[in-house]
Amino acid sequence: MEMASGDSTNQTHLGKRPAISTNYSNSSFLCSVVAIDHTNLSYRVCSQCEKSLPQTNNSSFCKYCNFNNKDNTSFTASKRLFKVLVSIATDTKVFVVVMFDRAAKVLFGCSADEFFDFEKTHPFAAVTAGNVLEGEMLKVSLSNPKNGNAQHLRVASVAPLRSGFQPVIETLRQLYRVRDSS
Ligand SMILES: [Zn+2]
């Protein structure tokens, strides 16, 4: 009895290959930011149900809310949520993960709407944000994508390791203040 269970445990251990991607999806690990896709940091959603709205026009009419509530024919308001593609490096490889709103807010220190508004007056804010984050050491945990078609593991939690870390938006405000006054 004991032998048998011991054997099977050993076997599964021995048979286990170092499957890196599945390891990453279970526990937290250290990595550094290689780059972020600064061309597309957020997307528009319905402010009520948070389903994605058409990104091509400015209509905030949500067909999902309208389906659910036939009396509600009014246009609902929209808001933005972060969706940031981040290339990260571990000690063994470099790969791309996707950071949704809750995780991205930890690094950016503001809502996606606030950042979007900041970009209107500071057109290079997104590029600079990428430069600011580059090389930042992070402790992250990943989870499998909810959508089966999604290509990238998603960041479930993120914690900057550097003691002097400050959110991107604060760094940007300082940078631009310095430039403005010079
Ligand atoms: Zn909606």
Image: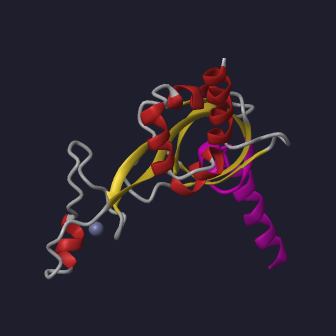
Q: Residue at x 72, y 57 (%)?
A: 11
Q: Is residue 106 visible?
A: yes
Is residue 24 shown in magenta? yes
Q: Residue at x 68, y 33 (%)?
A: 174
Residue nearest the viewer, comparing 122 with 153? 122
Residue sitting nearer the eye, 57 or 25: 57
Residue 31 relative to residue 34: left or right: right
User: 2 and 118: which one is in front?
Assistant: 118
**Quadrant into which the N terminus falls:** bottom right
Q: Position of residue 39 (x, y in %)?
A: 42, 30
Q: In the image, is 95 to the left or to the right of 7?
A: left
Number of dots carrying numbers = 0
Residue nearest the observer in this picture, 12 or 92: 92
Q: What is the magenta range? A: 1-30
Quarter in which the C terminus is drawn: top right
Q: Is residue 89 above or below residue 59?
A: above
Side of 85 where 35 appears, left or right = right
Q: Is residue 19 magenta?
A: yes
Seen in the picture, residue 2 relative to 181 is either above or below; the reply is below
Classify residue 2 by image quadrant. Answer: bottom right
Picture quarter with ligand 1:
bottom left
Residue at 74% x, 47% y is 29
Residue at position x 46%, y 33% in the image = 121
**Vertical placement of 179 versus 89: above or below?**
above
Question: What x and y, as percent, mark residue 166?
Answer: 74, 42
